[in-house]
Amino acid sequence: MKNLIRATAGLAAACACLFFATILYIQHIIPDEIALTGEEKFIISQRFSLTLSETSDLLPKVVDARGNTFGLNLYLRDQPAQAVISHGEPRMVVPGGNPFGITLHTQGILVVGMTDVQQGASLVNPAKHAGIKVGDILTHINGEELERGCDVRLLVSGSQGEALKFTLLRGGEELELELTPALSEFDDAYKAGIWVRDSSAGIGTMTYFDPESGLFAGLGHAVCDIDTGAIMPLGHGRIVDVNISGVNTGQSGRPGELKGSFLSHVPLGELSLNSQAGLFGELTGSFLSHDPIPMARRHEVEPGPAVILSTISGNKPQEFSITIERVNHSDISPTKNMVIRVEDERLLEATGGIVQGMSGSPIIQNGNLVGAITHVFVNDPSRGYGIFAENMDKQLKIIENCRLVA
């Protein structure tokens, strides 16, 4: 009898674990926000579905931007779950694929390394002793705002060894630290013991342009410091026209890259935001040639054939075939939402697959902009990650909202 009770209890516990594991799995694959454009049903899988109804007796209720009230049900063995619904027309955007040059100047000065100072028979590091760390953003010394990296050198070298008050940002928090420069025997100058950077330059690809707001989105990931990997805090910057002159072919273990040169210093756009989801700003010059297409919501993206627009020679984009192998609808990884594989033999022959500089290349499926290329698989350049266009658009709307507030 006891064995039967134990077996029954064990079976019940196993069923409970399976039930809650299934709920957690469904919560994992359901996005935090779902936007339906005239559709009444969103299919999670063959077993699970999300339905909207105008019957106000159903709970939970969802009110969209137009003031319409819907009842929302996710059926999982009769267990309801909640999500946020917006209901409206698809956003129409102009797809890119055009390359652009990036010149970005930081807001503050980024600490990218430490270096010891020779002082007598010993090595000292004033910055480390003061508590400064790699990745910190220096904003002021003795209350004087820092605009360029050379500002740090001039203020430190002119200190005559007196203690300086450094104001910096670390993880969004403002700190004040006291640093006493050390006199270097190498060149008889006072040093802080840090390497700093105030700018970055490179090549990326335009993802889309919003003709209503005049704003653009590109790259699909942040511009990061090459040494620290930290997102470079944007002070000001611009994009300029670029000509792609060659390609370093990607190979397993060695990512390739596009080679190009800036055609002009006349800006095509001014940068407004450097975020995890890409580079955003206002387009001031016209260099896009495609007609507007709908932007897909994440739940519309599915495994299957698609195309990308990318430029591997000159400055005009071409269309190349790919396959979307896997789609992750959750918000756990905001920039790695899709796994894609290059199928087009022309692109594979020319580049080996995905190379640096192609980041931001728009992904189009069923006539809709669904996302952009972000990263290449180091050990397989024919495959890489993509970000949902919807995730990029959330960042672009931050700029739009700031305009409205201003």
Image: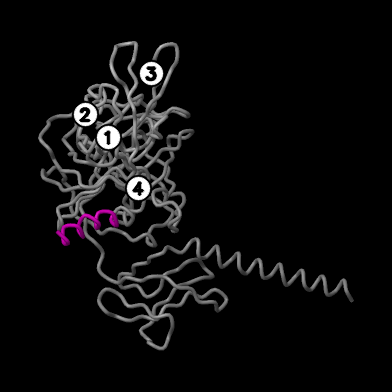
The alpha-carbon separation of the residues under discs 2 and 4 comes to 22 Å
* Label located before the other in sequence (3 or 1): 1
Give the Cα distance between marks 4 and 3: 28 Å
**CA neighbours of label 3 inside 10 A, class few (<14), some (14 to 19), many (20+):** many
The reply to whether dot 4 and dot 3 touch (C-beta < 8 Å) is no
* Residue for point 29% across, 11% down: 187
| Disc on res. 56 | none
Quick one: label 4 or label 1, which is nearer the N terminus?
A: 1
Compared to residue 331, the image places residue 246 above or below, namely above
As drawn, the label of residue 109 is 1
Label 3, label 1: how far apart the Cα atoms are: 20 Å
Residue drawn at (33%, 51%) of the image? 371
- In the picture of the structure, the residue carrying the numbered disc 3 is 117
Task: Please state which of residues 33 and 355 is positioned toward the viewer in this rendering.
Answer: 33
Q: Report x, y in % for residue 304.
A: 42, 53
Q: Amino acid at mark 4?
A: Glu
Image coords of residue 13 (percent x, y):
72, 69
Task: Give the magenta range.
Answer: 393-406
